Image (tube, helix red, strand yellow):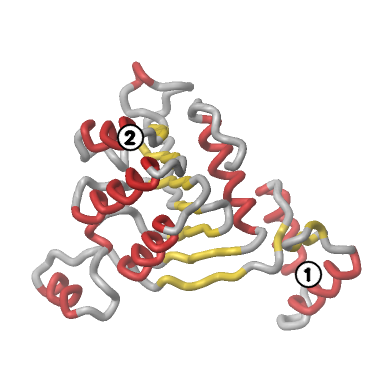
């Protein structure tokens, strides 16, 4: 099993040492090796080491970290999401992304057609008019589909990559229903009134894994016939 680090592939001895150390923590079984081999075979990418992961426990923590990364961005911003609402949270994302685009930082957005069915066309047109490249994943309208039309083929990935160095991924969409903190009074009040929001979690990642996630974004962009991306992507 070959592992890859921040500066490239590790030697066979280094890879073996890491795998042996991980394997020694569990029972004496080959299930760990079989699991790793299966993951590599399915994904088609090497496992990576030397990554940093920060747990973002809920929507507020995730949005705060995302906004900080976007505002500091110096290179392209790639975003892929299932739901992007035209509400307080969605409008804030649209605002900061449009501002970065106007600063000359290219923003590329993949939005699922079904998941973003609610917002008016003007919401996404405003982004596109600013220069943001917006791709609609598998349009619900078959007349504008860019490939074989499949109603149930949906993009549930939630991914944000900033500067090619920081990535966010997990279960949090872009919507105000994720705005209640895990332990906030507002969140409890919403639950008691029967209008509870969604509680989910994200990860903020740095290290070699970001390049692998970037490849996933680029592959999806290409499969949906998006405009050619800049070389820095």
Q: How many labels were placed on the picture?
A: 2
Residue pictured at 39% horizontal, 73% vertical: 57
Q: Which residue is mark 1?
A: 30
Residue pictured at 60% horizontal, 42% vertical: 232
Quadrant assignment, res 11: bottom right
Residue at disc 1, secondary structure = loop
Residue 58 rendering spot, x and y as whole percentages: 35, 70
Residue at disc 2, secondary structure = helix
Residue 166 rendering spot, x and y as whole percentages: 53, 59
Residue pictured at 19% horizontal, 73% vertical: 187
- In the depicted view, which residue is nearer to us: 133 or 156? 133
Please tell me whether residue 24 is drawn above or below residue 69 in the rendered image: below
Side (left or right) of 31 relative to 131: right
Q: From the image, state whether disc 1 or disc 2 is nearer to you.
A: 2
Residue 16 rendering spot, x and y as whole percentages: 85, 70
Residue pictured at 77% horizontal, 65% vertical: 33
Quadrant assignment, res 206: bottom right
The quarter in which the C terminus is drawn is top right
Can residue 68 be seen in this snapshot?
yes
The quarter in which the N terminus is drawn is bottom right
Q: Residues within 10 Å of mark 1 (few under 14, many from 20)?
A: few
Mark-to-mark CA distance, 1 and 2: 53 Å
Please tell me whether residue 69 is drawn above or below residue 83 in the rendered image: below
Q: Nearer the N terminus, badge 1 or badge 2?
A: 1
Can residue 1 be seen in this snapshot?
no
Q: Residues within 10 Å of mark 2 (few under 14, many from 20)?
A: some
- In the depicted view, which residue is nearer to us: 29 or 158? 158
Q: Which residue is mark 2?
A: 130
Please tell me whether residue 157 is drawn above or below residue 123 in the rendered image: below
Side (left or right) of 58 relative to 108: left
Quadrant assignment, res 12: bottom right
């Amino acid at each position: 099993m070959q592992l890859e680090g921040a500066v490239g592939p590790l030697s066979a001895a280094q890879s073996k040492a890491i795998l042996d150390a991980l394997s020694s923590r569990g029972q004496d079984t080959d299930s760990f090796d079989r699991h790793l081999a299966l993951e590599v075979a399915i994904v088609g990418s090497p496992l990576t080491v030397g990554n940093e992961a920060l747990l973002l426990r809920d929507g507020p923590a995730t949005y705060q970290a995302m906004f900080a990364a976007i505002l500091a961005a110096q290179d392209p911003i790639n975003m892929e999401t299932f739901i992007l609402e035209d509400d307080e949270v969605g409008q804030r994302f649209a605002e900061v992304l449009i501002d970065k685009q106007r600063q000359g930082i290219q923003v590329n957005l993949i939005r699922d057609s079904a998941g973003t069915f609610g917002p008016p066309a003007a919401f996404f047109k405003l982004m596109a008019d600013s220069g943001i490249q917006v791709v609609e994943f598998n349009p619900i309208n078959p007349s504008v589909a860019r490939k074989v039309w499949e109603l149930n083929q949906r993009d549930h990935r939630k991914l944000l990559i900033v500067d090619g160095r920081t990535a966010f991924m997990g279960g949090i969409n872009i919507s105000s229903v994720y705005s209640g903190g895990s332990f906030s009074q507002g969140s409890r009040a919403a639950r008691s009134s029967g209008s509870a929001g969604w509680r989910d979690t994200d990860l903020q990642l740095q290290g070699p894994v970001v390049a692998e996630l970037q490849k996933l974004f680029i592959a999806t962009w290409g499969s949906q016939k998006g405009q050619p991306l800049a070389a820095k992507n």
